[in-house]
Image (tube, grey):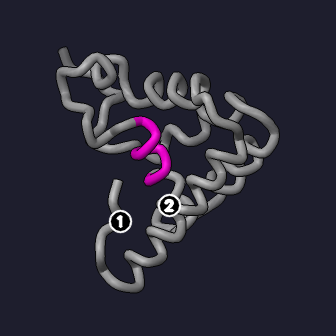
Amino acid sequence: MYQNDAEVLFPARVIASLRYLRGEKWQKLVEHVMQRAEHDTELLAFSLLMIRVDGCLACHSDSFRALRGCTACAQQTIARYKGTDEDLIQQWEAARRDVLAWRQSGVAPTA
């Protein structure tokens, strides 16, 4: 079965659908990131955050998550996340530091 919404890694097009799933701080982060260009460090950091939180590296084409699609997977992951908005924002800041370090050194961040 082929799912049109499944990609190899978290797609940036899904970011907007995550806006209202948590509190005001999360909403502000999502809105901030949505305004960024495709290759902007802050948008890439958000994608890295979602890759880490969603477990995208362990997903494969015939997994249940892939069959549901990236949008449903990301929405469920964020809605069910047990930590606070601040926890997610701290993880985004760590991902942003990793992206910046990668851009400066060429060493890929770990997922």
Q: Circle 1 is placed at which residue position?
A: 109
Label 1 element class: loop
Residue type at mark 1: give it: Pro
Residue 53 within the magenta-colored segment of the rendering: yes
Q: Distance between the residues labelled 2 and 1?
A: 8 Å
Residue contact between numbered discs 2 and 1, judged by CB atoms under 8 Å? yes
Residue 65 within the magenta-colored segment of the rendering: no
Q: In this view, does 28 lie to the left or right of 60?
A: right
State the residue at coordinates (43%, 78%): 101
What's the mark number on residue 15? none
The chief SS type of the magenta part is helix
Q: Which of marks 2 and 1 is nearer the N terminus?
A: 2
Label 2 element class: helix
Q: For label 1, count other residues whose C-alpha is less than 10 Å away and answer few (under 14), some (14-19) or many (20+).
A: some
State the residue at coordinates (18%, 21%): 62
Q: How many marks?
A: 2
Give the residue at the far right of this rendering: 24
Out of 78 and 94, give the one closest to the viewer: 94
State the residue at coordinates (50%, 60%): 95
Q: In this view, does 55 lie above or below 28?
A: above
Q: In this view, does 100 lie above or below 17?
A: below
Residue type at mark 2: give it: Ala
Determine which quarter of the picture holds residue 33. bottom right
Q: For label 2, count other residues whose C-alpha is less than 10 Å away and answer few (under 14), some (14-19) or many (20+).
A: many
Range drawn in magenta: 48-54
Quadrant of the rendering where the N terminus is positioned: top left
List x then y, in percent, for residue 54. 42, 36
Q: Circle 2 is placed at which residue position?
A: 95
